[in-house]
Image (tube, helix red, strand yellow):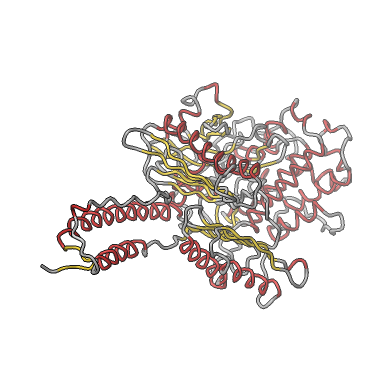
Amino acid sequence: MARLSFKHALLFIFLIFTTVHATDVPIFLRQNCTTNETFTSNTTFQVNLSTLLSFLSNSTRNTEFRNATVSGGSPSDTVYGLFLCRGDVPPQLCQQCVLNATQRLSNQNTDTCKFAKSAIIWYDECLVRYSNRDFFSTVETRPRMRLRNTANISDTKSFLRLLYTTLNETADEAANSSNGAKLYATKQAKISGFQTLYCLTQCTPDLSPQDCRKCLSDVIGDLSWCCPGSQGGRVLYPSCNFRYELYPFYRMDSPPPEANVSPTTSTIKKGRSRISVIVIVAIVVPIVVAAVLFIVGVCFLRKRASQRYINSLGQDSIVDDLTDVEFLQFDLATVEAVTNRFSDENKIGHGGFGVVYKGVLPNGHEIAVKRLSATSLQGAIEFRNEASLVAKLQHRNLVRLLGFCLEGQEKILIYEYIPNKSLDHFLFDPVKQRELDWSKRYKIIVGIARGILYLHEDSQLRIIHRDLKASNVLLDENMNPKISDFGLAKIFQADQTQVNTGRIVGTFGYMPPEYAMRGQFSVKSDVFSFGILVLEIVSGKKNTDLYQSKHADDLLSLAWKHWTEQTPMEFVDPTLRGSYSRNEVNRCIHVGLLCVQESPSHRPSMATIALMLNSYSVTMSVPRQPASFLRARSPNGGPDSDQSTTNQSTTSSIPWSVNEVSITELYPR
């Protein structure tokens, strides 16, 4: 009978295992970079960056973390960088992952991150990061990334309780890690006799145990933002991350089984160390088949899960496609649970679009749930627009979208909870407006200007809000303004300056004349609305209220009258009682009048406005008389008319809204 060398059999098994693991390659997830700070080619900064990336890619031998600083030239040319491999990743895969990441960062000339001074890149197995500022030993929570498994859990409540408990136990273990300086931990928990929960947490080892635990608390707090009701998901910060699944996605170290070969089952010939082929087949083949099936099965599950994650990223889809933000989706059962089934006790506001409820997520975070009514004036187009737009925006003066729910007839948006409601709640209330002293009002004006400037010039997308008004400016606990309601917003291409539309949407009293009468809108449309808002904040008077009152000037005419008569302080809200800076008030009125000039070309840009509000050295032009079309085009006879103005107009193309409700004509784009 043919006989086979025992060494050859072992070599056969080894080749099978190495062939299976050869397919284990780094999986790219996402890259993020600054767009407002860049360097130029062939500069000292670029040389230092190349040196840093080269050093990191060659520093992976027997280590899963390394940080480094490369300086030379001026202090602004210093570059800081690090890499971190997942705690379970073997050295060879870690080395390949860091090499791939540094090469990708080095070849940014053809990437969206061309010449960025700060960037971070995430792979499934590692992250690499560099910056022109020192971020070592600091808890960094932005930028962040989330990925979710598209399969959902049936019993959400009990699963979430177990998940939060297990993740926090894993975080405690990572922060007080026994794995040397890894700050890495994994943990398993039984869901049922057939299902096991697998959790992983990790921090960059340059953090202290206390900072690591704080970072992990924050990242676990984003669980509801990431993947509510999902069978798996993860959130990655620059300084820490977590992941959970219902399958073993990380490598679990276990000692090799001891050999248990009975001498009665084998025939060993001295000197030649040969074994009969029958015994080899009986022992080796079942082991090999079982091992191959197991490894192939695990690889298949990992590949399928990774593909789900990659598919859920959707970075560059068109704005109106909800698959763009699929990982933000809440299921209706979760929303009902956190709002006590939309109870009246949780109601915090309402309008023409529907009702806003307060909710509390399982981690204690408060949220605002905007539930659109079945007859809401905000249609499906506006809903998709708002969800996908706001998800891409990050600025301290913009309200943060946490997610949305779209099931059956329900259209729901989930926002961060803003405790002080909207600006109009204070500004136009005879009692509450006294809480807005001049310093708070000026801070609100400057904050709104920064938010609009971000939309126009500093965000990755160039966005026109189109419905800026007091009720769409929310105030946080420190009275910082946050612009909300992006249902009517539009994206402009980089080379676009103006767009024409036959679908006029917005709120009467805040629309510029070129938009209301000719359907033309641009960044200067938001500038006009901002000017109205500034004049309302200074005077404490609502533009539409003055418009409706008998024998009264509208707000623009009143402001212009005091300006030309050189009595601007008489325009100021009487509740301020002189406790204001005359220079600041005068400057704000001046800015407001510049913004509401009839010709868009005469209105300043938001960048110029921000400069005028923050610097007294800027020379301001003389404002021209404001647009007067509002009074000329009043429905049913103008301000002296006794008839109701709601939903009436002298033309068929412009819907009127005098009760602060955004009106939308539902025509296809």
> From what the image shows, is residue 290 above or below residue 660?
below
Residue under the point 50% across and 27% down = 339
Query: Looking at the image, how many numbered discs can be counted on the residues?
Result: 0
Residue 59 in percent (x, y) is at 58, 66
Residue under the point 76% across and 73% down = 73
Res 637 → quadrant: top right
Asked whether the viewer can see residue 597, the reply is yes
Task: Pick the residue in front: 149 or 658.
Answer: 149
Asked whether the viewer can see residue 33, the reply is no
Which residue ends up furthest to the front in the rendered image?
270
Which residue ends up furthest to the left in the rendered image?
1
Residue 659 in percent (x, y) is at 61, 34
Q: Quadrant of the N terminus?
A: bottom left
- 568 horizontally vs 554: left or right: right
Residue under the point 65% across and 58% down = 458
Task: Pick the residue in front: 75 or 476.
Answer: 75
Which residue ends up furthest to the bottom in the rendered image?
42
- 480 horizontally vs 218: left or right: right
Residue 37 in percent (x, y) is at 68, 63
Task: Pick the residue in front: 26 or 603.
Answer: 26
Which residue ends up furthest to the top in the rendered image?
345
Residue 541 in percent (x, y) is at 74, 35
